[in-house]
Amino acid sequence: MKVILAGATGLVGGKVLEILLKEPQIESVIAFARQKQAISAPKLQWVIGDLPPASLPGADALIMAIGTTIAKAGSEAAFFKTDVEIPFQMALLAKDAGVQQVINVSAKGANTKSFIFYNRAKGDLEKRLIELGFEKTVVVRPALLLGERKESRPGERIGQFLFRNLNFLFPKSIKAVSAESVARTLVTALFSKKNGICIIENQDIHS
């Protein structure tokens, strides 16, 4: 199986890459990054540069773990470009290249009708991906992610500290989940024989 991975250097994407490179069923991984990366493997091909590229090669699946925060992006418009427009353009290119399945990391609460801008944006991308009509469309909606990021997100670090200590108090639907658990869920979905639209909520992410 040949997989295109967008967001390969992020918290979840990095874990996905680790898992894919160990999977015997994976023939090759085409991973995108803005800067040259130290990780190498016989079946790993890095594509360095900004997203989206001019085109994508043929592959069996596109996995997207692209995301930022409004604070880091600097504005709602910049956030929307990173979290909605770029992933959607990647999906369009994948569709043109004959890719059969798209698997995307979204967020708990994603809904086009939400009064929260972040959730509306995530819902917007979900809607667009579904409308493209891939043979398989998987959307994973994690709550707060646990794990060490390369970049600084102070607000998220505070949330992680609180959830690590109080997670047992919350129902599964809103419990914080590890980036590795989300990554395993994405890869499990990749190998699933079930086609169509699949939305995986926080409580169903593999622990």
Image: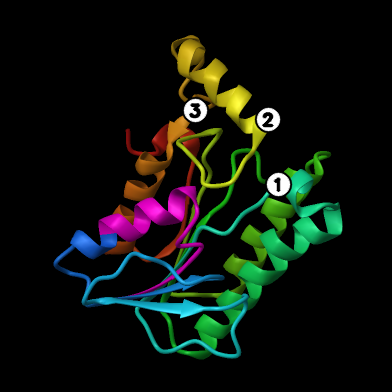
In this rendering, the label closer to the viewer, 3 or 2? 2
Query: Mark 2 or 1 closer to N-term?
Result: 1
Q: What element carries label 2?
A: helix
**How far apart are labels 1 and 3 at the CA level?**
17 Å
Instruction: Tell me, for residue 155, which label it has, or none.
Output: 2
* Residue 84 vertical placement versus 201 (above, below): below
Tell me the residue that label 1 is attached to. 69
Q: Do the residues labelled 2 and 1 touch (CB within 8 Å)?
A: yes
* Residue 202 vertical placement versus 173 (above, below): below
Q: Do the residues labelled 1 and 3 touch (CB within 8 Å)?
A: no
Q: Which amino acid does label 2 sit on?
A: Gly
Looking at the image, residue 206 sits to the left or right of residue 117; the answer is: left
Q: Which portion, as a residue range, is magenta?
A: 2-19
Query: Mark 3 or 2 closer to N-term?
Result: 2
Instruction: Tell me, for residue 186, which label it has, or none.
Output: none
Query: Mark 1 or 3 closer to N-term?
Result: 1
Q: Locate residue 18, reporting x and y percent.
A: 29, 56
Q: Which amino acid does label 3 sit on?
A: Ala
**How far apart are labels 3 and 2 at the CA level?**
14 Å
Tell me the residue that label 3 is attached to. 176
Q: In which quarter of the image is residue 30?
A: bottom left
Image quarter (top left, top right, bottom left or bottom right) of the C terminus: top left
Q: Nearer the viewer, residue 151 or 51?
A: 151
* Residue 170 vertical placement versus 67 (above, below): above
Q: Is mark 3 on a helix, strand or loop?
A: loop
Local crowd size for mark 1, using a 10 Å CA cut-off: few (<14), some (14–19), many (≥20): some
Residue drawn at point x = 33 percent, y = 62 percent? 190
Residue drawn at point x = 82 percent, y = 52 percent? 74
Q: Are marks 3 and 2 in contact (CB under 8 Å)?
A: no
Looking at the image, residue 174 sits to the left or right of residue 83; the answer is: left
